[in-house]
Image: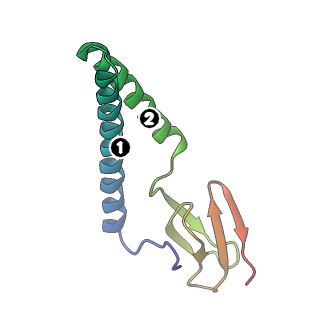
Amino acid sequence: MASPRLKDIYQEAALSVVRILTFTVVTLIVGLSVWLTSVVAGASWGLAGAIGGSIAGLTGFFILVCGSLYEVKNFTCPSCGKSDHTLKQIGYYNCSGCGSKYHIYDNEISSISL
């Protein structure tokens, strides 16, 4: 797997748009699914809407708090000091300056010896 290095600002902007679209689509799908399930189970449309909206809101909250979908992190190589914008929690980072390999996860950076 290649290093998740961002080459320019347009890639970061595209990832932001994809992140917003993914959040919106997942929240709407969950809300609609719960609403439809509630209606089929016999709840009134208003109650089903309240249940669906609540579950969709909780899903959106957990996506924002717990998720890191296409999150960009500024990474500085501990070996050579080269700085890059990379994706968090995707594979590994292969420094283009010194060739060192690192696994980036949240605030932890671990060296990979291959």
Q: Nearer the viewer, residue 112 or 52?
A: 52
Q: Which amino acid, mark 2?
A: Thr
Disc 1, SS: helix
Q: Residue furthest front?
A: 41
> Earlier along the polypeptide chain: callout 2 or callout 1?
1
Q: Quadrant of residue 25?
A: top left
Q: Are the two marked residues, 2 and 1, in contact with CB atoms closer than 8 angstroms? A: yes
Q: Secondary structure at mark 2?
A: helix
View extreme (right): residue? 113
The quadrant of the image that shows the C terminus is bottom right
Percent position of residue 96, x then y: 56, 84
113 and 33: which is toward the camera:
33
Q: Is residue 34 above or below residue 104?
A: above
Residue 98 image-quadrant placement: bottom right
Residue 69 spot, x, y in % from top left? 46, 53
Q: Amino acid at mark 1?
A: Val
Q: In front: 51, or 87?
A: 51
Q: Is residue 58 above or below residue 13?
A: above
- Provide the residue designation for mark 2: 59
- In 3D space, how far apart are the residues under numbered discs 2 and 1 (Cα atoms)? 8 Å
Q: Residue 52 appears in which quarter of the rendering?
A: top left
Number of residues whose C-alpha sits closer than 10 Å to that of mark 2, classed few (under 14), some (14–19) or many (20 or more) = some
Tell me which residue sits at (63%, 86%) in the image.
99
Residue ID at (31%, 42%)? 24
Residue that badge 1 annotates: 26
State how the image is colored. rainbow
